[in-house]
Image (spheres, rainbow, N blue to C red):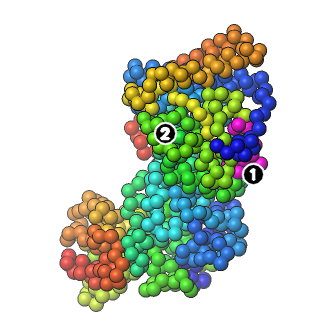
Amino acid sequence: MAQMTIAEALRQAIREEMQRDERVFCVGEDIGIEGGFGGAFTVTLGLSDEFGHERILDTPISETAIAGIAIGAAVAGMRPIADVQYGDFLFCMMDQLANQAAKLRYMSGGTLSVPMVMRAPVGATARGAQHAQSLEAFFTHIPGLKVVAPATAYDAKGLLKSAVRDDNPVLIFEHKLLYGSKGARSEKGALSPVGEVPDEEYLVPLGEGVIRRRGKNVTIVATLLMLYRALGAAETLSRQGIEAEVIDPRTLVPLDKELILGSVRKTGRLVVVEEDNLTNGWGAEIAAIVADEAFNWLDAPLKRVAAPDVPPPFAPVLEREYVPSEQKIVDAVLSIM
Amino acid sequence: MDNENRSEIPLEALPPQELLLRMYRRMFLIRRFEERVNELYMEGRIPSTLHLYIGQEAVATGVCANLGEGDYVLSTHRPHGHSLAKGVAPRAIMAELFGKATGCCKGKGGSMHVGDITQGVLPAIAIVGANVPIAAGTALAAKMQKTGGVTVCFFGDGASNEGAWHEGLNVAAVWDLPVIFVCENNLYAASTSFSKTFKIQNVAERANAYGIPGVVVDGNDVLQVFNTAKAAVERARGGMGPTLIECMTYRQCGHSRSDPRTYRTREEEDAWKELDPIPHYRAWLIDQGRAEATALSRLESEVEQTIQDAIAFAEASPEPTAGDIYQGVFKE
């Protein structure tokens, strides 16, 4: 059992998959340059030494091309892992993802598949509005794409390996404050959740959530950085006699609906926490599912804790107001108890 | 147009006799297929809009005659001709246009997305220019897998004003990918003329910006297209990277079904009809002693039969069932 940061766990997952399957390769900006960064957050650091530049492909700054290359290569039998430097750049390649990657299989009558992975860092980290968004919700709305959001090193490795082996386009959203990147690429204010990662091979299946903390009074659903805030809030609430059950869905598409519904049927209360803007976030979808399928078990209104409907601001005091805090989660829970 | 680039592709000897006739058959098949499809549409027997390939047959035919198994074709919103030229079955395409379960996309694609991956034709991509980066991807796969396969990416003149086009061409050039970019310059991006949207004379000039050869050919001359594509395909297979071929041609019909063509003159259309690729090639075959008129007529009636059979097949085929809507989103 090794102790790893999420960046190290992701790197190990890529390494193992590339060793296992010669169809797997990485493509992106600044991922394999000698003397470079190993991607913006060091995930691919050193991999070009191990696998060569034929399998760790550095591209021009051309996000549309990166996506198109991944799509075409996947259709033609490869297993690309594309690196998006910042999640916000997904908008540059939106046509490729929404119109091409997501639809090609369907348009073909199910006769081809697009087994590609797209890794994208998200989260507000003092970079202002264009290197900060949490974009998961956008992609949950597009049929044909899978959406993954790992919050621990164990999950990061196991989910990425599953994504590489999945026969569909999978977007993996990684939080900048959770990478545990070291050296010059480390992030101020990062949580750096180092976790135990087994030496032996394992996979974390897409579509299985996990209960991170058991409780009987309220269900809190959260991913990525918000998971840690939710767990912190749960400790605060526990001191007030409120035991929160904290669920990490781990993947948003496919969604482990039953895990959430089962918990809500037990607790009767739901708070969903996400770093994305409030309106039409994935939290709204979970709230709708619960209202639809567990209404009779509910003892209180559903609550969403999310960023307000403004772009991510720069000034630290504003950013702290933007990203949901433990206190906001505590307040949301208390408001429905 | 850079003469140095142009001279890199020498005019080859004539293709073998059998191929000469096969190319005529393909061109005639595409023409008659499109004409019959148009009639069926006007009779209300098939849904959708249509972007017909009439007038541009020499391009798809001449290029695809150089392709085989293991080669990929990326197509556009005007895709019937590309699919037919690469060998997708007329029955499967026709059934797709009818929205039938037996169509090449099982009724999920329609006119703008026909293709058949078993023939190397991806479902046609109807977002202009979006197929270019994907073509770089299929070409990269062939290069990594060392299959020797090439990718042909068809697009119109209008596509070369899309950002995706430039990103795709650049990365394909930088990585020497085995891809042939085939611009079908039919002088109009929908209703907007070439001169309104380009400060240059030819799309092929843009090849210079990416360090690859750019060639302009008469897109209505199937032999010229064939020979130019042949050299580009050989170059790509040899690991020398992409070529941009600009085929000057003309769509004899409107952009789509609802297009009255009021943005261009009947005189211009008549002039281009004089340059119709099919009667020209037919006359050439006879004049050069490559084919008897009677043999060509026989071939033409066989093609009519093929199309009639495709229509009958499509009409007799079942529609998808409502439950099929859920099939094919994800691969399990």
Q: Main secondary structure of the magenta part?
A: helix
Label 1 marks which chain's residue?
Answer: B
A28 lies left or right of A91: right
Disc 2 crowd, CA 10 A, few/some/many (<14, 14-19, 20+): few
Residue A84 in view of the camera = yes
Compute the Cα span from label 2 to label 1. 35 Å
Q: Mark 1: which secondary structure?
A: loop
Read off the residue under disc 1: B239
Q: Amino acid at mark 2?
A: Ser
* Image point (48%, 21%), residue name: B267
Q: Residue furthest top?
A: B294
Taking the spot 49% from the left edge, 25% from the top edge, the residue there is B268
Q: Residues within 10 Å of mark 1 (few under 14, many from 20)?
A: some
| Whether residue A146 is visible | no
Q: Could you tell me the amino acid type at mark 1?
A: Gly
Whole-percent x and y of residue A230?
Answer: 35, 79
Tell me if A296 is positioned left or right of B102 in this view: left
Above or below — where is B284 with respect to B189? above
Residue B195: assigned label: 2
Question: Which image quarter is the C terminus of chain A in?
Answer: bottom left
Quadrant of residue B66 within the rendered picture: top right
Q: Quadrant of residue A298?
A: bottom left
Q: Where does the image place residue B53, in percent across and percent down from the top left?
A: 53, 29
Front-lying residue, B145 or B177 = B177
First in residue order: circle 2 vs circle 1: 2
Q: Is residue A41 magenta?
A: no
Which residue lies at the image location 69% right of the left edge and 66% below the top edge? Answer: A53
The residue segment tinted magenta is B228-243
Q: Is residue A94 above or below residue A188?
A: above
